[in-house]
Every structure is written in C-alpha cells, then in structure tokens.
Image (cartoon, rainbow, N blue to C red):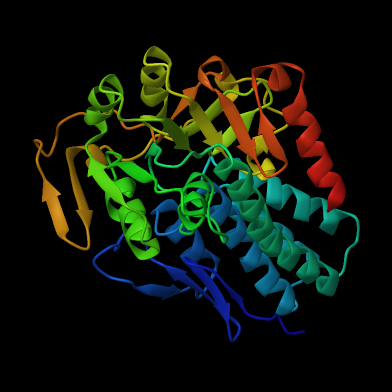
Amino acid sequence: MEMHDLVSTGLRYQRGELHVLDQRRLPGEEHWHVCEDIDDLVCLIRGLAIRGAPLIGVAAVVWIAHRAAQGDDVAALTAAIATLRASRPTAVNLMNYLDYLQAELDSGIGNEAMLDKCIAIFEEDVMLCEAMSENGAALVNDGDSILTHCNTGGLATVGVGTALGVITRAHQQGKGIRVWVDETRPLLQGGRLTAWELGKAGVPYQLICDSMAAGLMAKGEVDHVMVGSDRIAVNGDFANKIGTYSLAVLAKHHDVPFYVVAPRTTIDPDCASGDLIPIEQRDAAEVRGANGSFGDCCWAPVDAPAYNPAFDVTPAALVTGWILDSGIYDQQDVADGELAKVYSQLKGSN
C-alpha cells in the first residue's frame, strides 16, 4: 500500500518518510528531521520542534497514515493513537483528530480506508485555512495596523495559517497593512517564527516586546488584534499562547477589536468553559533563559524558581469575534450555541 507525498511549510511526507522542520532552530537554520519511529515524533512534539495546534494534530495523523500504509494491525494503530494523544495536553486538534481515527478503527475500517481518512484530514486543514483567511481578510481595511501574538502561519498548520493566514491574505489583496509582531515570551515564537514567515511573504512588520502593546494601543497605533487558539470551549472562552489574555484586556480597555482565528477542529465540544481547559506547565528553564539556533543563554540564577504555563485562557466576554472557516461569529452567535453546532457540522462532513 502506497501513500502519496504531502508537503507543507513545516511538514513533509515524501518517499515513505515523515520529515519535520525543526522550529526550534529557526530563523537561523532550516533543519529537517526524519522521524524514524513514534518516539521521535513524540519527542519533537513535546520539544516544540513541531508546534501549533493544527500542525501537531496533522503530524500525528500523518504518522498514523504512514503506519497504516506499512500494514500495522488494529492493535498497533490503537497503541500509536494512544501514545500520540498523550504527547501534549492543551492543543485539542490532536485529540479531536485521533479520537475520530480511533472511532473509525473501532468500527472495523481497513488500512486502506484509514489511509484515505488521514490524507483527507491533511487536505481539510489546507481548505480550512483558506476559508479562514478569506473570512478574516474581509474585516481588514486599507492601511490597517494589526497586532498578533505567537505564531499562527504555515508553521502552525499545513495550510496558510490561522491569524497569520488572514494577515497575509489581506496583504495579497493589496490593503497596505502593517503588522506589529509580539516577540512572545518565553520562547519567542513571534520574534523567531512569525517575523520569519512575514519576511518571506513580503508583509511589512515591526517586531515589538510583549510589554510594548499597551503603549501602541494607547497611541491609536493598533486597529485590530488577531490571534490563534489551541482550544476553544463551546461558550467561546479559548486557550492560546501565554500573554493572549493580557492583550485581550488591553484591547477591551482601548476599544480595539480583538479576534480569535481558528478552524472548527480547534473547538472542544466537550468543554463547557475555559475553566475546564487543561493548561500545560513547562520547564522552568524556558523562563530563566533562552536557546535556539543562536545557542544557549541563561540570564537568571540557574536555580531560580519559575512559573511557566504555556497558555492562558481568554474569556469570551473579551472577544469581538471568532473567525472560523465556516464564518465570523459574534457574542450573540456564541451565546446561542453556534460553536457547538458548527463543530458538529464539520464532523458530519467527514
């Protein structure tokens, strides 16, 4: 059984091998790992070589497709799904995709049909990104300044991205936008990854420290805030990279529209509110210093206690709109239960 090539910015399946771009080494070095086994993939996910809720989920799905193509039996595929599902706790695309594949396995699906299901998920993410980009770009006016946080482009998905997909699409439409890029402490995904992607796309941007956002809003230099999400509760609360909640509070105070951009696959239909979203706690060393293609740097005492949640939760009350592939939803839509409905519609189409 053969599996055809799948190619995106951060993930490639070619000649029967899964290749992953190591995002920890960007922007200084573009290094591709070849995943030899499932332990390699789990290590890359946990170590943030692969990151972004959609990409994490799709990478896991591509591995299951690979093993199905190699002829693994139901027991082996079930074990692989369980191992990958436990690799990171907050990004719900991973769980949504793998639970769907497990249900298909339980129904007696064969390996060839499983392979088709997995490839369809990859292709679906590309289409979801396209739809989000078109929907969100309609909100952007000529000359707007947009502030974004973390990284939400082709490095976080297998399509054009979520919030960054909206931004690049508005640029392609000739709207003369400029972008404020939060560096995004502690792992600098904005400074390392978003700046790299925007530079490649030719989108005008300026990099800022996270703490500069308030001053920019106070001076009227921000027209929209657009961010991604790792999990959206059905009441509209959502988890995203730490620091997102701060931006939402600032945007509310300064009357700046605040949008979350995500595919329907990021909705958790079993999560009633943000209080129920599990928040990943990461190594304190990430706060004491930094490492990457530039080497290692520690600026705090090596034994300094540090608090390091990877995400925070933004309440729905602070969100102007939810930009999904299926449309743009406001506060009333969400209060009416539209997020749960559109997730169900997506699953019904699979």
| Percent coordinates x, y for residue 315 in the rendering | 53, 18
At a point 26% along the width and 27% down the height, the residue shown is 216
Judge whether 297 appears above or below 196 on screen: above
| Percent coordinates x, y for residue 288 in the rendering | 18, 38
Give residue 243's quadrant in the image: top left
Q: Is residue 231 left or right of residue 163?
A: right
Give the residue at the far right of this rendering: 108
Residue 187 seen by the camera = yes
Give residue 95's quadrant in the image: top right
How many numbered marks are there? 0
Q: Is residue 54 left or right of residue 164?
A: right
Judge whether 69 appears above or below 315 on screen: below
Judge whether 53 appears above or below 109 on screen: above
At a point 69% along the width and 64% down the height, the residue shown is 123
Residue nearest the observer in this picture, 221 or 76: 221
Residue 80 seen by the camera = no
Q: Quadrant of the N terminus?
A: bottom right
Q: Is residue 271 left or right of residue 316?
A: right
| Percent coordinates x, y for residue 200 in the rendering | 36, 65
| Percent coordinates x, y for residue 327 in the rendering | 70, 38
Residue nearest the observer in this picture, 313 or 281: 313
Q: Is residue 31 left or right of residue 68?
A: left
